């Protein structure tokens, strides 16, 4: 595996229902996200601040203001 290859992981909150995403946290300056059901398919890339705002909103901290 190349040093800059994403190391994918699923949240420990994910169930085995198949509706999961995977995230890679080892790529500087970007947060890649993909569908766990299609590991060879496309991935979306988010700026770290945008990903943090999304996670905070999902966790119930409220929607970020723009």
Image (cartoon, helix red, strand yellow):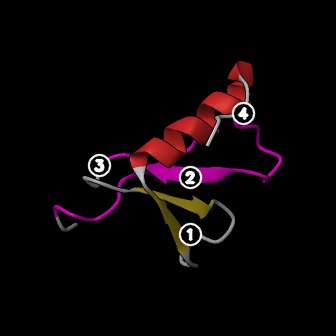
Q: Do the residues labelled 3 and 4 touch (CB within 8 Å)?
A: no
Quarter assignment of residue 66: top right
Q: Does the magenta stretch include residue 23?
A: yes
Q: Do the residues labelled 1 and 2 touch (CB within 8 Å)?
A: yes
Tag in front: 3 or 1? 3
Q: Looking at this view, is 14 or 24 the one in front?
A: 24
Placement of 38 over or under 11, stated as above or below: below
Tag in front: 1 or 4? 4
Mark before the other along the chain sequence, 3 or 4: 3
Residue 10 visible from this viewpoint: yes
Q: Does the magenta stretch include residue 15?
A: yes
Disc 2 target residue: 22
Q: Residues within 10 Å of mark 4 (few under 14, many from 20)?
A: few
Residue 13 visible from this viewpoint: no
Magenta stretch, overall SS: loop
Q: How crowded is mark 1: few (under 14 residues within 10 Å), some or many (20 or more)?
A: few
Marks 2 and 3 sit apart, C-alpha to C-alpha, by 13 Å
Q: Give the range drawn in magenta.
A: 3-26
């Amino acid at each position: 595996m190349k040093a800059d290859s994403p190391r994918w992981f699923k949240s420990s909150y994910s169930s085995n229902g198949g509706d999961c995403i995977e995230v890679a946290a080892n790529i500087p300056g970007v947060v890649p996200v993909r569908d766990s059901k299609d590991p060879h398919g496309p991935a979306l890339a988010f700026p770290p601040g945008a990903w943090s705002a999304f996670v905070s909103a999902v966790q119930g901290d409220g929607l970020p203001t723009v």
